[in-house]
Structure formats: structure tokens, C-alpha cells
Image: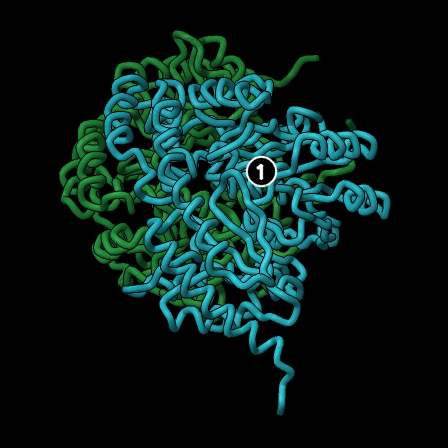
Chain colours: A green, B cyan
Amino acid sequence: MWYQHLFAGRTGRIQDNSIREILKVVGRPGMISLAGGVPSPESFPLDIIQELCGSVIEKFGPSALQYDVTEGFRPLREALAHYLAEKQVATAPEEIITASGSQGVLDAVGKVLISKGDRVAVEAPTYLGAISAFNPYEPRYVGLESDDEGLVPESLEKVLGEGRVKFIYLVPTFQNPTGRTIPLDRRKRIAGILQAHGALLVEDDPYSDLRYRGETIPPIKSLAPDHVVYIGTLSKILAPGLRTGFCVAPGPIREWLVRVKQGTDLHTGTFAQAISAEYLAGGYFKRHLPRIQSIYRPRQTAMLKAMEDHFPGSFEWPRPEGGMFIWAEGPAGLDTEEVYHEALRRNVAFVPGKYFYASGKDGKATMRLNFTMSTETDIEKAIRILGEVLTSFQDRISEPADD
Amino acid sequence: MWYQHLFAGRTGRIQDNSIREILKVVGRPGMISLAGGVPSPESFPLDIIQELCGSVIEKFGPSALQYDVTEGFRPLREALAHYLAEKQVATAPEEIITASGSQGVLDAVGKVLISKGDRVAVEAPTYLGAISAFNPYEPRYVGLESDDEGLVPESLEKVLGEGRVKFIYLVPTFQNPTGRTIPLDRRKRIAGILQAHGALLVEDDPYSDLRYRGETIPPIKSLAPDHVVYIGTLSKILAPGLRTGFCVAPGPIREWLVRVKQGTDLHTGTFAQAISAEYLAGGYFKRHLPRIQSIYRPRQTAMLKAMEDHFPGSFEWPRPEGGMFIWAEGPAGLDTEEVYHEALRRNVAFVPGKYFYASGKDGKATMRLNFTMSTETDIEKAIRILGEVLTSFQDRISEPADD
């Protein structure tokens, strides 16, 4: 049978996530992968999860396994309201919607807000999963400028002045891929710009609990609540395989997100939500989070130290206080895709930074390095090898080509 | 802040599922609800699920809680291949995609196949969840005629002859809402028509394991594999709160379904898939299914018997050999929405059949009666009351109005 004529027009915009393709080749034995973007399996509280499986069946009975309302499992929404209050996001359980990971919220946001050709403003570079979620709804992307403190407010002001933008998508804390965090004073300026322009921000916040040093910074949601759809997830602080994400959105948008989600998956998995609810409400999260931080903190320190020791002087990178990634930028003329292939031959993997640009053209000299999945020893070894590879490439760039 | 200008054009096609709205009002004390469409909580194998939570953590370790590939958790796909072979659907694990319930497949099918204005053929009446899944992609629906043996093949032939149809959506076994099953000879004719027209069928099969009498009938997928996207779910044979659905689709369509699902939710919940895998592969399903059937069989029998005893002679209904519903049709002129309100006053709820018609105009004299959620005693009582209400309405219809 011939199928090509059956596909919808939007499939032209849907691609494989290139990074997931990259990740498929880095699993071979002996490889040290700094390419991943996933939490360490050591961070999963397997004993707690096993205990909670029994206690949620005892506590909630069959309702932990039945169909549930689209908005989300009530005890989880209650627990999330407390969790969010500690992040200075004041919200009632009724204002929270749970979803199949933060990806489920991103899809619903795209479905509710994007008509074909609408402008959506994103950081350059930005989180690729958001682009995969939005693409089927056929937006046009407008790139926002960033510096070491994340989004440059003047760039936002300029883009909003140039015409209607359906929404702005940001990861303000320990961004994926750059690890950058927008400081509080800049968040206040961004909140003011949103209010002045009547604009909507989609604030994706998967990493803020993974802080290893420094002071917590409140989300932009807490500064301009009517202007922000705030997205969170338990993927990094419990386990991604439970697919528990959530959002807090202004009333009219929230109502549409619920209607849309009903068609997408009826509701988020009840059992996983029940486990998540008990994890938060039963005090397990508070006890387990320091353990997760204590796994990642030394890994991040080891990576930053090794980069100081081994990366060529022409490279720059921010020193984030948390998250899962270090972002490095080399000299103009470097193509980290070539570096990637050479590094793979020496059993080290990372993700070339260009994959994180919606434009598909920028970021050729950049690279994303993940530190959550490897031990300090492996990180030191991988960065040393990568430093050697980068030095050899740098030498090639600085020598004029003679053919 | 003003939000109205931010919504996408497609939101005009997205509505609340009316039945979910109806279900919200039927939970009051003393009410016997025949309105639901959900499995009985007594059918959930809570003890097995609790046991499996421990054994999957032991067996699969942290990978049962980690991110996973979009296609689905490998051990579940292997178990499903065996499960499907017993339904005469010959398939390899690589050909199966898991999803967040069958609803997750329906959404992905819509996203991959429907461009605005495309024709999609559905039974009248049809499953409402499919309409909610497809609506955001803005199809036009073409109604297919059904009789007591389900879809009338001549009607399919006619619709396919009138112009391109992106796909046909059917629930061939114990359909929701009618309980009807298409017999084998008619399935063969439908398969032949699909092949002759190069047409694609989306075959939704959530109920075929809930057979209380008679012989199993193979899915249309087994008769024309290249022409069918087959959708299944564990919601009725394990528990809906795990949200484990799946599909088997022809290669080119399957590849697009995976790409699309990556943007929608990255992947289906790993932990729930691991539990589902062990439930099927460990022999638990084979042992538990007869118990589920033994809960529902007497309830269906009680409902059919009570309808014989108490429903007015002007009513007709099929006698399905399984499923969750009985569908009754009254005389022309009856409006079961009015019956619904009178029945509610007498503490009996059901769903007026008109909600299951994509047209929004037909089926005024029909009603859907669910028998999975009530005991035999309650079913007998509810049907007796409903019989009295229907008789009073019938008397009003047959008396000419005198004002």
C-alpha cells in the first residue's frame, strides 16, 4: 500500500530529535559519554519508590489505578502547591495541572496557542525538546539574544516591539544547554517588560532544585504571575520514568490546556502521580534531594577543574552553580561537529552545540558537556582527552590552510 | 492581562467531552450510575500490581525509572507481540509502539495524518474520545452507516468512492457506545474493500478480551495488515491509571507516529510499562482475566434480563456477548435527554445516546447503559426505575399533544 499521500502537511516540520539520534551511538563499551541529558540512575530513590508503591495502594486504594480527572490527581496537586510555595510561587491546587512530563505541558501549550505562522520567541541556543513540541503546530521562531546572564532584556524588548509574539519560551535557571541562570535583577526587568507589553512567558524550570552552591533565585512566575505559564517536573528530583510534569497557568489558558490534554491522553498516569504525591507530601523529597545534590556537586566541580587544566586558552565557559551541563565556546572557525567525530574515535562523546539553535546555522564553535552521568574519575579523563582533541583542532584553525 | 488573542485557531474545534461533564454530576450518594464507561475497581489486581512493583525494580533496576526510547519499553513490546499473536495479529516487537493509553495513539494518529479539512470516516454513533483526539487537527467527519452487525460494508464502499478519506475509524468489537461486534464474514468484506481502495483503517480494540460468551473473532488487522493501524490498551484488563496503550501500524506510518510522539511526551511512563510487561509476560494476565470476566458476566446478564422485564415493547437493543455497554433505542419522537433528567431525579443515571454522534443531531431516542460499575442488585433496581420512566415518556409520545 502507498502511504505518502496520507500524511498531514505538518509532518514536514516534524523531525527526529538529533540529540536522541546522537545518544544512540554513544552507548558502546568503553565510551565516556558527556552527551547525555539525563539524571544519574544512582539519583533514583529506588527503596523509597518501592515503599511508596505499597503505601499508595494502601492509602488511596483502587483510585490510585483508576481513570482520573484531566486536571490531575488531587493529592499530587495539593503537594505541588506546597512545593511551589517554597519557590515563592503562590498557587492553589486548583491552579495546577499535571502532565506526562514537562514535555506534555509543552505540547499542550503549542496546541492551545500556536497557529501556523505565529511568532514564538526562543533563546539561542534553546532546549530542543521544546522545539520538537512546538514544531507540529508550525510556528516561526524569533531568536532572543543571550549573554552569560541569560536572556538580554533589551533583545526581548526589541522582539516584542517588532510585532505580535504568541509567547516567549525560556529556561531561566541552569538552562539546557548553556547552564546559565538569569539573575534576580534581570528577572525583574523581564517581568516588567512582559507586563508593559501584555506578553506571555512560558517558563520551563526543570533544574532549579539541582543547586549545588549559591542562593536560590525565585522564578519569573513569582514576579509577574498573570504573564507566565510555569512548567515543572519531578524527572530530575524523583525519576523521569514516572513522567510527572506539571504547570501553573493563568486561568483562561489553564482551561484550554485541560481541554486539549483531554484529547491528547485523557489524563496523566494516576499511579505515578500517587507515588509522586507521597514522595513530596511524605517528606521523602526533602530528605532525598541533598543526596542527589551530593552526587552531582563533586562531578560538576571535577568537570570545571579539569576544563581549567586541559582546555585551550581560546575557550570560554560559564561556571553555573547547579544544573546538569557546562557549555563551552571555542574560537570562531572551529566546527565542533568535526571535534565530535574525532572525540568519538577516542571514546569520548558530547553534543555539538549547533543542535540547540532553532536557526540550524549558529553555534558551530560550541559544545554541551553533561556531568551527571559520569564519575569524577571518568569526567577528569574525558575532559583531558577532549582538551587534547580541541588543542589539535585549534592548531589547525590557527595555521592558515596551505591547499 | 488579556489572553483571548493568544489562542490558536484550532481551539474553536476543541470542546469538553460532554460525557465527562455528565459524569461529574452523577457521583452523588444514592445514585445508581449506568453512565460511566470505566472498569470496576474490583477488577484491578491490586495484590498483583503491588507484587510487580517490587519485582520490576529487582528485575530491571533503575532502567524501570529512567528515560526510555519513544518506541516503548522493550520488554513490554516483546510481551505485547506474544499477546497479539494470540489474537492472530502476527507482529514483531519492533513493530509495536506503546503510548499513554489508546488515547495517546489516537492523538498521534490525528497529528500525523489529518490536515485541516481532511475527510475522516467514523461510525455513527462512535467513540467520543476519538473525536476529542482528532478535533484539534480540524478534520471533516463523514458518517458511516451501522446496523446490528456494526459497520455496513456498502456504506464504506460508497464513502470511499466519493473522494479521498484519510482514514476510517472503527471499534469493531463490543463497540463503545453500542456494544456491537462486526461478524467475521463482514470483517472479511471490509478488509477487501480497504485493499481495493488502498484505504487505511484505524481499528480501536479496547474491549475484545472482555468476552463473556461465544467465539473470539480476529481483528481486521489480521485480515489486511498493511491497511490497518491496530490500537490496544491494558486499561480494561489491568488498570487504566497505568495509561498503557499501544499500536501496530504499517512501517511508514509507524515511523511518523514515533517522531510525533517524541514531541508530545518523549515516551510513555517507563515504570507503568515495566509493570505491564511483567503482568503479561509473567502469566498474571492469563490468570486474572477470567476473574474480570466473572465480575462482568453476571452484571451483563442481569441488565439484559431486567431490560426484557421492564423496558417498554417499543424499545430495541442488541445482545452483545461482551464489552461494557448495552445500547437501547426507543421510538421516534423520544428525547432521552429529557428521560435523563427525570431518571436523575429518581437517582438513576445513564448517557443519552446523542452525545456519541459526531453530527450532534442524530440519536435522540438512544441511550447507553453501562453494566461494569454496578452490582446485579443495583442494575436490576436501576433498570426497573428506568423502565418506569421510559414507560411514562412513551405514554406522552403516543398521546397527541393537546396544547
Image location (x, y in percent) of residue A354:
55, 32
Per the image, label 1 sits on a secondary structure element best described as: loop
As rendered, which of B357 and A366 lies closer to the eye? Answer: B357
Residue B243 left/right relative to A41: right
Q: Quadrant of the C terminus of chain B?
A: bottom right
As rendered, which of A335 and B167 lies closer to the eye? Answer: B167
Residue shown at 29%/64% (left/top)? B30
- State which quadrant residue B31 falls in: bottom left
User: Do we see residue A122 in this rendering?
Assistant: no
Q: Quadrant of the N terminus of chain B?
A: bottom left
As rendered, which of B327 and B194 lies closer to the eye? Answer: B327
Image location (x, y in percent) of residue B337:
53, 69
Residue shown at 54%/63% (left/top)? B312
Q: Please rate how many residues cluster around mark 1, counting C-alpha atoms within 10 Å: few if below 14, some from 14 to 19, many from 20.
A: many
User: Do we see residue B63 in this rendering?
Assistant: yes
As rendered, which of A314 and A236 lies closer to the eye? Answer: A236
Disc 1 chain ID: B
Residue shown at 63%/57% (left/top)? A115
Residue A368 left/right relative to B96: left
Image location (x, y in percent) of residue A396:
56, 16
How many marks the image carries: the answer is: 1
Label 1 sits on residue: B173
Disc 1 marks a residue whose amino acid type is Thr
Residue shown at 54%/24% (left/top)? A21
Image location (x, y in percent) of residue B367:
54, 59
